[in-house]
Amino acid sequence: MFLTLLLLAQVTSGNSALGVADSAIITSLVQEGTVICSTASGPAPCKNAYDPGMQGVITKNPAVSFQPVGGQTNTNVYSIMASGKAYVLVTSVNGTIKDGDYLTSSKTIGVAQKSTKNGYVLGEALEDYTDTDRSKTGLIQMTVAPRPLILNEGALANVYQIVREGVDNLFLTPFAMLKYVVAGIVLIATVIFGLINFGKVVKGGVEAIGRNPLAKGTIQFNIFVNVLLSIVIIAGGVGVAYLILIV
């Protein structure tokens, strides 16, 4: 069965979004600027911070949008801006926002916050938001571009951060869940292999020195090389797992 889509274009004004928006049926209560995530039951307002399922933001006045035929009469069909400029609901719960700051989802349903650590972001702010009242929300313009982002260097810390955010979000898409499973298998397998190799090398080196004390220097050098190889294997596993997560 083919899904027929209508391409709608309009003259932008006011709080218009600049870019191409997709459309989806959303049964939850949403408004202009609501941050939308993919869930097991379909698109819905995000409710977790740094949610890896971030799709985009609700816009009621996109420059161009794709809608299913007959969607104009369905009150539950909304335009979702996944790439481009749009207005987004924000809160200062994670600090006030400056032009150029990265934004991400927050625990306030459907509202974005300032991103201050490694994880998934929604995009970059194009305006300041200086209201320090954390109970309030505001509407500012941003560049929407959902993606994982490294704010702090360190591969191991980055893997830990992204995995923790994934565990915190219970409703992952099947593809996202598959990435976590594959990355976990790769990481665990390489760590186990590296530790087994390390144990064998140390044990064999001690036995060799006991049998031939005169070759102690050469044996110690071989032990050092193999221990270094074990460390490289483990580091490589961490790197591969991280690359799997951010793709």
Image (tube, rainbow, N blue to C red):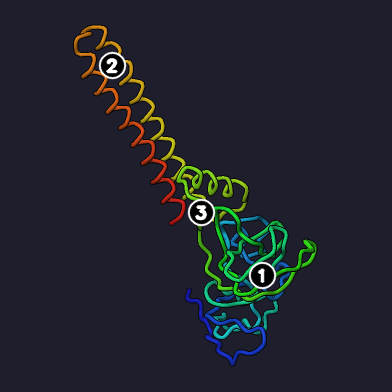
Q: Compare marks 2 and 3 and give the one earlier in the sequence.
A: 3
Secondary structure type for disc 1: loop
- Secondary structure beneath label 2: helix
- Which one is in front in this view, the residue at disc 2 or the one at disc 3? 2
Where is mark 1, residue-wise?
Answer: 26
> Where's residue 53, x and y in %?
57, 59
Q: Where's residue 109, x and y in %? A: 71, 61
Quarter of the image where one finds residue 62: bottom right
Q: Measure the alpha-carbon separation of dots 2 and 3.
A: 43 Å
Density class for disc 1 (Cα within 10 Å; few <14, some 14-19, many ≥20) is some
Residue at left offset 70%, top offset 56%:
107
Find residue 176 and name its label: 3
Mark 2 vs mark 1: give the one in front. Answer: 2
Mark 3 → mark 1, Cα distance in angstroms: 21 Å
Q: Give the quadrant of the C terminus.
A: bottom left
Residue type at the position of mark 3: Ala
Label 2, on which residue?
Answer: 205
Q: Residues within 10 Å of mark 2 (few under 14, many from 20)?
A: some
